[in-house]
Image: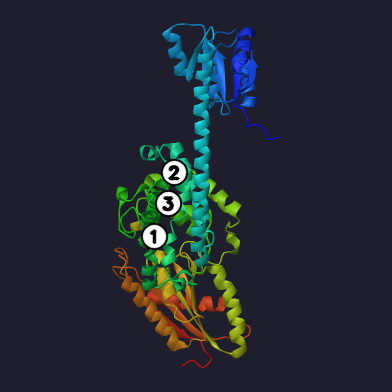
């Protein structure tokens, strides 16, 4: 025998047992009935059974009906339960007070069975309709999430280098948007937003990468300028793809519109230097301004072929440095309030950075001192077997302290990033590398490179830095940022230590500084020096 559909339930609260009996006889065949004869018991029963509706007497000893509904409204478990007052009072003021406290209807005493049934039935029907709508909405959301996950997986399966970027950014976005609601940031614009639906649609923000070549998506290193321009097309391509979906499906509702906005605007920058349209400030859709922070944050705390994952602390510093230039200042302020929650996601996902194992410099993204030390040990052992030569270049940014004092530490950090990028691009052979040695000092290692090659590289690096034309009004070497270089070449012997090369390169660097900076000095320490 089939089970009957579960009945809706009603809690009747009245201190008169006869009234409870009458209501049970009227409603008991159609509904599951719970009963309480005082306010305190009613609250406990409501929290335990969570009935679909409560019929509540107003005048009772102890807690009256007004106090009971106030307590029900204050509880997370019971505030959603509709309350119908039952009363013998016949005045407008009593009805107004009850409705103001949250009651949905009134039933008068003595009870009319037909009117009582209809009032309860109408409210129960509203409840059931609302639940049906909730179930359909949840089903639609599950369907959207499934479709989104499939499409997002298509992107991530092609882009092997960005890990779980889509799911991680969605987690960060949810934290950030919930916090914006909590703190009332852009409250008017977000008043009607369904955060869960929006977060689901955000998973399509990189859908345009489907149109980008696998060679570019999976290149194990930094992109060339031309490759980067091609990568940037994924924003417009994403917008086009979702427009095609809207046109084909005939659906133009919020989910797809949100996904389209995410796709085309999450790389715009507050100062107008972003892409694809160079929008600035409030011209950028709010969804794009919000998404910019989770998108950049995830890239910072994740490993890439050209950089080690930054710690949460360093990533947060970079986001703060971008306040008012890359990011909406108000949204950065919210991010800083919930930064710990972002860090917690990192731990839960199992990609928390282990700083002691890092081989990349957090500020510049190039190799760090640790990598230099470990690599030099291997290089010296290898070259000593063949008696080959090694050239080392110690590089220092001229008058960098004055630069920081003049333009600020944030500008100083930007300067070091540019210098590091130029130096890294100046390493043309696969075995050559440059590392940040400390502060404004860098060191380039050129295995099996003789004196002629070392001088060519040193001159190329000097010219490349000058070419960037970074203003430095307080420098005594030039009116722009320059570097001084101490270059050495020497044979590698069995007992050579890294410190030997550092000492000699450092001494030659001092000669370059003493000679006026913005130049390189070279010394040949080979046995067969000329």
Q: Residues within 10 Å of mark 2 (few under 14, many from 20)?
A: some
Residue 334 is tagged as 2
SS of the residue under disc 2: helix
**Mark 1 surroundings: few (<14), some (14-19) or many (≥20) residues within 10 A:** some
Tag 3's secondary structure? helix
Q: Position of residue 158 (x, y in %)?
A: 50, 67
Q: Is mark 1 on a helix, strand or loop?
A: helix
Disc 2 to disc 3, C-alpha distance: 13 Å
First in sequence: mark 2 vs mark 3? 3
Say which quadrant the N terminus sits in: top right
Real-space Cα distance between discs 2 and 1? 32 Å
Instruction: State the separation of the CA atoms marked 3 and 1.
Output: 19 Å
Q: Which of 376 and 115 is in front in this view?
A: 115
The first of marks 3 and 1 along the sequence is 1
On the picture, is 377 further left or further right than 508?
right
Q: Along the line of sight, which residue is nearer the eye, 240 or 399?
A: 240
Can residue 212 be spotted in the picture? yes
Q: Where is residue 510 in the image (x, y as percent from the top left)?
A: 43, 74
Q: Nearer the viewer, mark 2 or mark 3?
A: 3
- Is 290 left, or right, of 27 in this rendering? left
| Residue placed furthest toward the front | 1
Q: Is residue 497 above or below residue 64?
A: below
Crowdedness near tag 3: few (<14), some (14–19) or many (≥20) residues, C-alpha within 10 Å: many
Residue for badge 1: 241
The residue indicated by pointer 3 is 291
């Amino acid at each position: 025998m089939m089970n009957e559909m579960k009945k809706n339930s009603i809690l009747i609260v009245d201190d008169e047992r006869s009234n409870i009996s009458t209501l049970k006889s009227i409603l008991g065949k159609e509904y599951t009935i719970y009963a309480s004869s005082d306010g305190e018991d009613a609250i406990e029963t409501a929290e335990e059974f969570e009935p679909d509706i409560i019929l509540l007497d107003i005048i009772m000893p102890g807690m009256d009906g007004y106090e009971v509904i106030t307590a029900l409204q204050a509880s997370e478990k019971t505030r959603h339960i509709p309350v119908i007052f039952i009363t013998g009072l016949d005045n407008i003021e009593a009805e107004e007070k009850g409705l103001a406290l949250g009651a949905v209807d009134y039933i008068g005493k003595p009870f009319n069975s037909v009117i009582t049934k209809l009032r309860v039935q109408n409210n129960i029907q509203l409840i059931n309709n609302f639940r049906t709508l909730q179930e359909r909405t949840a089903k639609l959301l599950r369907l959207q999430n499934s479709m989104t996950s499939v499409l997002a997986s298509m992107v991530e399966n092609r882009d092997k280098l960005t890990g779980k970027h889509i799911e991680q950014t969605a987690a960060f976005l949810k934290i950030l948007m919930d916090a914006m609601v909590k703190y009332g940031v852009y409250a008017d614009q977000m008043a009607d937003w369904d955060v869960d639906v929006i977060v689901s649609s955000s998973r399509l923000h990189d859908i345009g990468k489907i149109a980008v070549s696998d060679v570019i998506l999976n290149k194990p290193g930094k992109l060339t300028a031309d490759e980067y321009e091609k990568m940037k097309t994924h924003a417009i391509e994403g917008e086009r793809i979702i427009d095609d979906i809207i046109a084909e499906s005939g659906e133009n509702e919020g989910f797809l519109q949100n996904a389209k906005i995410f796709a085309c605007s999450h790389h715009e920058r507050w100062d107008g230097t972003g892409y694809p349209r160079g929008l600035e400030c409030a011209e950028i859709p709010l969804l794009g301004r919000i998404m910019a922070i989770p998108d950049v944050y995830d890239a910072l705390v994740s490993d890439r072929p050209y950089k080690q994952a930054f710690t949460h602390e360093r990533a947060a510093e970079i986001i703060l440095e971008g306040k008012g230039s890359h990011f909406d200042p108000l949204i950065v302020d919210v991010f800083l309030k919930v930064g710990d929650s972002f860090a917690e996601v990192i731990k839960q996902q199992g990609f928390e950075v282990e700083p002691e194992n890092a081989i990349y410099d957090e500020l510049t993204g190039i190799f760090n001192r640790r990598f230099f030390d470990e690599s030099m040990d291997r290089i010296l052992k290898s070259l000593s077997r063949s008696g080959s030569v090694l050239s080392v270049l110690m590089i220092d940014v001229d008058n960098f302290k004055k630069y920081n004092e003049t333009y600020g530490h944030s500008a100083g950090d930007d300067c070091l990033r540019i210098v590091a990028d130029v130096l890294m691009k100046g390493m043309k052979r696969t075995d050559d590398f440059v590392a940040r040695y400390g502060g404004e000092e860098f060191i380039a290692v050129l295995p099996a490179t003789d004196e002629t090659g070392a001088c060519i590289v040193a001159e190329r690096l000097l010219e490349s830095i000058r070419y960037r034309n970074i203003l430095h009004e307080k420098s005594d070497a030039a009116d722009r940022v320059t570097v001084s270089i101490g270059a050495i070449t020497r044979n590698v012997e069995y007992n050579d230590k890294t410190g030997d090369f550092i000492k000699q390169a450092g001494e030659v660097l001092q000669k370059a500084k003493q000679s006026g900076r913005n130049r390189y000095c070279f010394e040949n320490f080979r046995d067969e020096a000329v």
